[in-house]
Amino acid sequence: MRILAGLFALIFWLGCGTMNANQRQGSGARDPYLEARKRMVQEQIRARGVKDPRVLAAMEKVPRHEFVPVRFRADAYADQPLPIGMGQTISQPYIVAYMTEQLKLNGDEKVLEVGTGSGYQAAVLAELAREVYTIEIIPELGRRAAETLKRLGYQNVHVRIGDGYRGWPEKAPFDAIIITAAPDHIPEPLIEQLKEGGRMILPVGDVYQELVLVTKTRKGLRKERKIPVRFVPMTGEVAKHPPGEKTDQSAPPQEP
Ligand code: SAH
């Protein structure tokens, strides 16, 4: 009788063990995508020059496959952007890592993202900063991203549905700002919501786009053109402000 009870206890214990291991998505040895993620970091990100160890660790940790539609899961760690529905895309892993590294986060920051999309970039930021505020203009995408982030346990990401052109004034100023849809000029309200000493990275342009890093210093704005990129266009209010409207937009960005 005692042996039988022991046997039952053992079977129950084994059962629980398996369940827990399966539930620990994204971090345990049972994550079927862990190897693919490590390879992605080595071959696509580190090999191309991203060095910040905290950024590399975040890219290795965040389960990108959870942010892509189920039918694209097998390609979640491939060297390319992927469709996420509503005509939008999740950026290529290298671009996510590159833009994140440019923000030079140390863990204490309040960050604003415009263009939540799948929520993947927000999750990467959440690993590296204190609070992340992210705005998405397409309600369905914003809602889905908020659900994914909640399911994965991210408590320091706050999703708002709306037009990010005017930023999130109630939470400003921000230590860092990242825009993941391309405007044809740098939105003035976002410059205003950047802290002195803060950094903003964004794609700028129409057909031809470049990543621009904006640093706000006591003396003014420093703009550095980085690499050519291809993002979906920013929509909404941005279209009402032609590129030449603001005087400081008409000056070409400075080289580093
Ligand atoms: N960062 C995302 C990818 C973004 S794709 C990710 O990690 O998955 C760009 C997103 O910006 C799209 O979802 C698009 O709907 C959104 N977008 C475009 N214009 C916007 C605006 N004015 N305000 C907020 N979001 C916007």
Image (spheres, grey):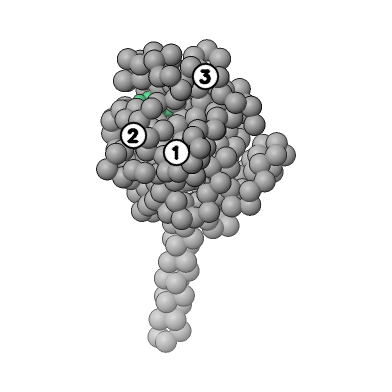
Which quarter of the rendered picture does the C terminus lie within? top right
Residue 58's place in the image compared with 50, above or below, is below
Asked which secondary structure carries label 3, the reply is loop
Chain-order first, disc 3 or disc 1: 1
Name which residue lies at 43% across and 13% down: 244
In percent of width and height, residue 31 lies at: 54, 51
Q: Which residue is mark 2?
A: 167
Residue at mark 1: C-beta within 8 A of ligand 1: no
On residue 75, the disc is none
**Who comes first in sequence, dot 2 or dot 1?**
2
> Mark 3 against mark 1, which lies toward the viewer?
3
Q: Are marks 3 and 1 in contact (CB under 8 Å)?
A: no
Q: Secondary structure at mark 1?
A: strand
Does residue 156 show up? yes
* Crowding near the residue tagged with mark 3, few <14, some 14–19, many ≥20 C-alpha atoms within 10 Å: few
Say which element carries label 2: loop
Q: Which residue is mark 3?
A: 251
Whichever of callouts 3 and 2 sits on the residue coming sooner in the sequence is 2
Q: Amino acid at mark 1?
A: Ile
CB within 8 Å, label 2 to label 1? yes
User: Where's residue 148, x and y in %?
Assistant: 37, 43
Percent x, y of residue 57: 59, 52
The number of discs equals: 3
- Ligand 1 shows up in the quarter that is top left
Q: Which residue is mark 1?
A: 177
Which residue sits at x=46%, y=75%? Answer: 10
The residue lying toward the viewer, choosing from 179 and 219, is: 219
Task: State how far apart marks 3 and 2 are (Cα).
Answer: 23 Å
Mark 1 is surrounded, within 10 Å at the Cα level, by few (under 14), some (14 to 19) or many (20 or more) other residues, namely many
Distance in Å between CA atoms under marks 2 and 1? 9 Å
Comparing 132 with 63, the one in front is: 132
Frontmost of labels 3 and 2 is 3
